[in-house]
Amino acid sequence: MRGLFHGIGTAAALLLAGSAVAQERPASDPDSNIVVRGKTLSAKEQARALVGRMSVPVEGQLARFGDEVCPFVSGFTEVYAAKVAARIRKVAAEAGASPGGAKCRPNLVVVIVDDGREFTRELYRLYPGQFTDMDSAKRKRLLASQAAARSWTVTGIHNEDGQAIGLSSSSESDTSMNGARITVGNGKPVLRVSQASIINPPTQQEIELAYVVIETRATLGKNLMQVADYAAMRGLMQSRPEKLAADDNTILRLFEPGTVAGPTTLTTSDRAYLTGLYYGRGNRSAASQMGQISAGVAKKAEAEAAQ
């Protein structure tokens, strides 16, 4: 203990000595007038940085829904669940995705539960195939997470026209470039592509199933549309909100530690992100997709600042 107090006393003495030296510096010292300023990023630079933090590429692309978006909501009363599902369909339609009808097969599942960790672990035990899109490290992190909200997706590789991998029989044949007939598949998975571009891949990553799991305690103090917009944003794209900065203006931060209230609805950046993600063909590279999205986010930010 004597050594501890001696160390504290020594540190205090050094601080006092430093203070005395500072007081003895002449007022005319040119260094005393130096002001350090950080670089102010342009709207385009800020947009690129934000989009980079929001995005999680899969095999060099940003995954999105190719088929109809069909939300299923559990954990609310029937009336509230219907409102959340309707809101998700509306957000999907505004982004450029195709919302499914009331009886379509669910592929965006929103669940409100008391214990998200336990629910996820039980789901993995019963349906391990719904976690096949993860490597072991990512799956381990998800199953161990204590986060108030979590999301994961199952993605599949499709060709540039949105067709999935299929099985071909040994009798199937195609025409090669020289006109000869060749047998393909032999009962193995086959993905047919019609182009070979050095700019855009002949394939795309599509979200086939998305889960958004939110704990009941986290929804206290939030309104229904906040939760619905959060679920829509997390379900329609792939993200890791823990990568976001504390001042990023996106609803993805709604349930992150330290966030008191969060946006009351999708932000301008959120809407621009989804619109950019679902614009055009899905077989673009992640760099191309993120560039397109960043341009839209920057444009919206500049327009909002001008108002």
Image (spheres, rainbow, N blue to C red):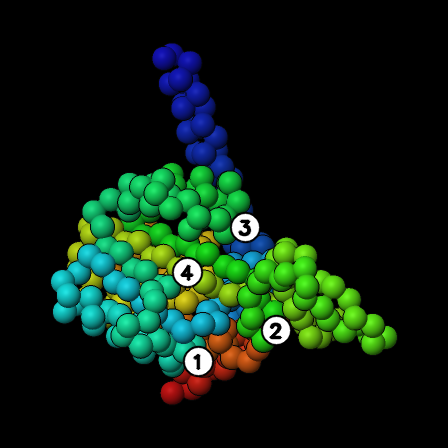
Name the secondary structure under disc 4: strand
Which amino acid type is shown beneath numbered disc 2? Glu
Q: Is residue 200 visible?
A: yes
Q: Residue at x 28, y 41 (%)?
A: 118
Which residue does the numbered mark 1 point to in the structure image? 96
Q: CA distance from mark 1 to mark 3?
A: 65 Å
Q: Residue at x 31, y 41 (%)?
A: 122
Q: Residues within 10 Å of mark 4 (few under 14, many from 20)?
A: many
Which residue does the numbered mark 4 point to in the structure image? 209
Q: CA distance from mark 4 to mark 3?
A: 69 Å
Residue nearer the viewer, 307 or 4 = 307
Which residue does the numbered mark 3 point to in the structure image? 26
The mark that comes first in sequence, 3 or 2, is 3
**In this rendering, position of residue 270 left or right of residue 289:** left
Position of the N terminus by quadrant: top left
Residue 79 in picture, x, y percent from top left: 14, 69
Q: CA distance from mark 4 to mark 2?
A: 19 Å
Q: Quadrant of residue 107?
A: bottom left
